[in-house]
Image (spheres, rainbow, N blue to C red):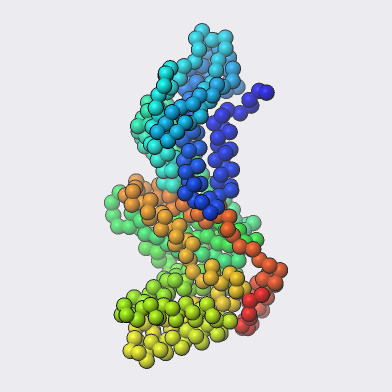
């Protein structure tokens, strides 16, 4: 059967399927497989581009002045690497003056160093690479001088992936919960660290979706307002619940752009602020009391009463600053208790987003400073995109939980005070 697509296109399809399925419960294995496929793709493309140049024409292209020779399929070749064999399809030719011999793999055995290629693939998907980076890493791998067209194609495709993410419309995405947070990174070759703002959420179908990654110089009200307006301009409707930390600029932007949405103050951020104002001997006891109050609460009103009791206890013990910290924005701290019990723990903090941003920071320690905004934003986009958007452990709503959520929306629409409800 005649092969209608080149081997590189088939490898691309495998990568797309991997990204569509996501990392599941084994993110390290998924990233390893992505690196392996990406290394194969780079080598396969280099061979195909080399063959096109040798033959004098691209696939399905006709040129009268081109030297004689017709494509005659591919021959599998096993390339030895330090990590095992790598399969590459070498193009074959007939009716040519001489057979095609790839300069990348001269006759005889050759050990290809795939670690630079793996570094390039991961770097490509998580921070972007310049043509100089691509050429240097391929040379380290033993591929010699890579063609300018191959290097340019690798770089442009990476930029296109991130650009497409930032342009896509959000009209078909209906959110139950929106999570927003920021991390500070060394975006440029010099100067102070800058904020990178990230937004993701759970849809009404229980799927996770990464929505936006953009620069926020100071994480100010104007920065968060720009992110919210970008989401709205691309068609995102108001979410039922917005989970965020207590940054004043963020709170102001959320209440201005989505006034009808519930706002949940991240419970993890709040307990960190609270414990920082206590002596070490009392921190564990207060931490347990804090989480027990939220875990055992039957509803919003009950949770608020339990936390009020902790505020009074701290105030009586002379921890005025800690009591004031907990009392501040207390109403927003218990909003998640208005929602179905089974999902409350997920919806009371930005933990998942923080974990993925922690992975971003772990990678940036190796990278150091970024060469510019695009490289930095591509990294912050790609890691949460793998860990959040493609995760298989989303959520499922039962029929009773859907009725519960509809009731919350109905009460909000009619501007009534929500009653405490137990979980569906």
Q: Nearer the viewer, residue 280 or 357?
A: 280
Q: Nearer the viewer, residue 66 or 353?
A: 353
Q: Position of residue 83 (x, y in %)?
A: 42, 35
The residue most toward the left is 190
Q: Residue at x 55, y 18 (%)?
A: 92
Q: Position of residue 233 (x, y in %)?
A: 56, 58
Judge whether residue 234 can be spotted in this image. Answer: no
Counting the numbered discs, the total is 0
Q: Position of residue 187 (x, y in %)?
A: 35, 52
Q: Residue at x 36, y 78 (%)?
A: 283
Q: Is residue 32 above or below residue 176?
A: above
Quadrant into which the C terminus falls: bottom right
Q: Is residue 340 left or right of residue 80?
A: right
Quadrant into which the N terminus falls: top right
Judge whether residue 346 can be spotted in this image. Answer: yes
Q: Residue at x 46, y 73 (%)?
A: 267
Q: Nearer the viewer, residue 258 or 240?
A: 240
Q: Position of residue 203 (x, y in %)?
A: 61, 61
Q: Is residue 121 above or below residue 277?
A: above
Q: Is residue 66 left or right of residue 4?
A: left
Q: Is residue 26 left or right of residue 142?
A: right
The residue most toward the bottom is 316
Q: Residue at x 58, y 62 (%)?
A: 202
Q: Is residue 388 above or below residue 302?
A: above
């Amino acid at each position: 059967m005649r092969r209608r697509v080149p081997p590189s296109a088939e490898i691309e399809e495998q990568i797309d399927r991997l990204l569509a399925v996501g990392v599941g419960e084994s993110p390290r294995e998924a990233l390893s497989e992505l690196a392996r496929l990406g290394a194969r793709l780079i080598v396969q493309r280099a061979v195909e581009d080399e063959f096109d140049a040798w033959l004098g024409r691209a696939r399905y292209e006709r040129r009268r002045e081109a030297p004689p020779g017709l494509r005659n399929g591919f021959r599998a070749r096993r390339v030895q690497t330090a990590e095992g064999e790598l399969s590459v399809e070498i193009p074959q030719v007939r009716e040519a003056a001489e057979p095609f011999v790839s300069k990348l793999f001269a006759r005889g055995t050759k050990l290809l160093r795939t670690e630079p290629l793996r570094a390039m693939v991961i770097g490509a998907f998580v921070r972007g690479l310049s043509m100089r980076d691509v050429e240097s890493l391929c040379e380290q791998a033993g591929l010699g001088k890579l063609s300018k067209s191959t290097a340019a194609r690798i770089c442009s495709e990476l930029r296109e992936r991130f650009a497409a993410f930032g342009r896509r419309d959000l009209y078909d995405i209906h959110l139950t919960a929106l999570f927003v947070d920021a991390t500070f990174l060394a975006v440029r070759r010099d100067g102070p660290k800058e904020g990178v703002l990230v937004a993701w959420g759970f849809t009404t179908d229980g799927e996770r979706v990464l929505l936006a990654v953009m620069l926020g110089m100071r994480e100010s009200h104007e920065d968060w307002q720009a992110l919210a307006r970008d989401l709205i301009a691309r068609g995102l409707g108001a979410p039922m619940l917005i989970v965020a930390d207590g940054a004043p600029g963020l709170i102001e932007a959320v209440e201005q752009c989505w006034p009808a949405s519930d706002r949940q103050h991240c419970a993890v951020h709040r307990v960190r602020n609270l414990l920082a104002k206590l002596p070490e001997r009392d921190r564990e006891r207060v931490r347990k009391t804090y989480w027990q109050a939220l875990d055992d609460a039957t509803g919003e009103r009950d949770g608020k009463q339990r936390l009020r009791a902790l505020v009074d206890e701290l105030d009586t013990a002379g921890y005025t600053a800690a009591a004031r910290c907990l009392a501040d924005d207390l109403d927003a701290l218990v909003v998640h208790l208005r929602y179905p019990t089974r999902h409350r723990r997920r919806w009371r903090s930005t933990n998942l987003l923080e974990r993925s941003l922690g992975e971003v920071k772990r990678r940036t320690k190796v990278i150091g400073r970024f060469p510019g905004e695009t490289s930095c934003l591509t990294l912050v986009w790609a890691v949460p995109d793998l860990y959040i958007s493609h995760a298989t452990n989303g959520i499922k709503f039962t029929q009773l939980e859907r009725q519960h959520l509809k009731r919350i929306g109905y009460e909000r629409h009619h501007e009534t005070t929500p009653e405490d409800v137990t979980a569906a």
